[in-house]
Amino acid sequence: EIVLTQSPGTLSLSPGERATLSCRASQSVRSSYFGWYQQKPGQAPRLLIYDASSRATGVPDRFSGSGSGTDFTLTITRLEPEDFAVYYCQQYGDSPPRYTFGQGTKLEIK
Amino acid sequence: QVQLVESGGGVVQPGRSLRLSCAASGFTFSTYVMDWVRQAPGKGLEWVAVIWYDGDNKYYGDSVRGRFTISRDNSKNTLYLQMNSLRAEDTAVYYCAASEGGSTFDFWGQGSLVTVSS
């Protein structure tokens, strides 16, 4: 089973700053099987990035995803107040089909 | 617009059963892979089960395999999760999620809380 490890656990930044969130996989992950989610308190997760670097519908262009193999990054340029939330990475493995999530990175206001 | 609405959650004693439903609207249900994902209080996300478009292929996470059963009724645009032999560690908010390509979760419901307690 592929394990996803996110870092840092908590990231404290100010609005307007740039955020860089990391997700490392224990084995190589196909880029088309990798995504990022945002979750705000009391809400369901929301898909931000699919295929490692494609923005989901309605996601602002300050969010971008990059990476391949075992190292993936979510970058948020110019943080807005509504961006402070928990972010999860996720991968899909197809033999047999199963999904795993990272443990999450909490992005908090400094 | 796309809507996924879960129902059927509640408080249940250990060892008992519960069935969750997820009513879908705003998209062509039969063309989406459907999943259940759960989140224990204050914890991260855990994938529970997936069912393919026609319902013939189903897969489960290790912690629920043999106890939970996922199913779907494409004529009713509804996803189900039958949960048997419930344990305290199954306490969580259960989300249904839709995936067009099968690899990431495009849409999520608002969640249904299941509490397993005596």
Image: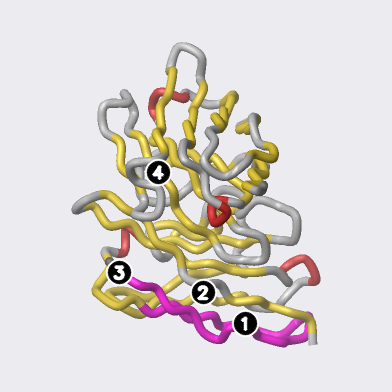
Q: Nearer the viewer, residue B28 or B16?
A: B16
C-alpha distance separating marks 1 and 3: 25 Å
Label whose residue precedes the other's in the sequence (1 or 2): 1
Q: Which residues are magenta?
A: A3-24
Quarter of the N terminus of chain A within the rendering:
bottom left
Badge 2 is on which residue? A74
Secondary structure at numbered mark 1: strand
Q: Residue at the spot x=48%, y=57% of the render? A: B46
**Which residue corresponds to mark 3?**
A2
Residue B24 screen position, x and y as percent: 57, 26
Dominant SS in magenta? strand
Kind of residue sitting beneath label 1? Ala
Disc 1 and disc 2 in contact, CB within 8 angstroms = yes
Question: Distance from label 3 to label 4 (Cα)?
Answer: 17 Å
Q: Are marks 4 and 2 on the same chain?
A: no
First of labels 2, 3 by sequence position: 3
Q: Which mark is residue A19?
A: 1
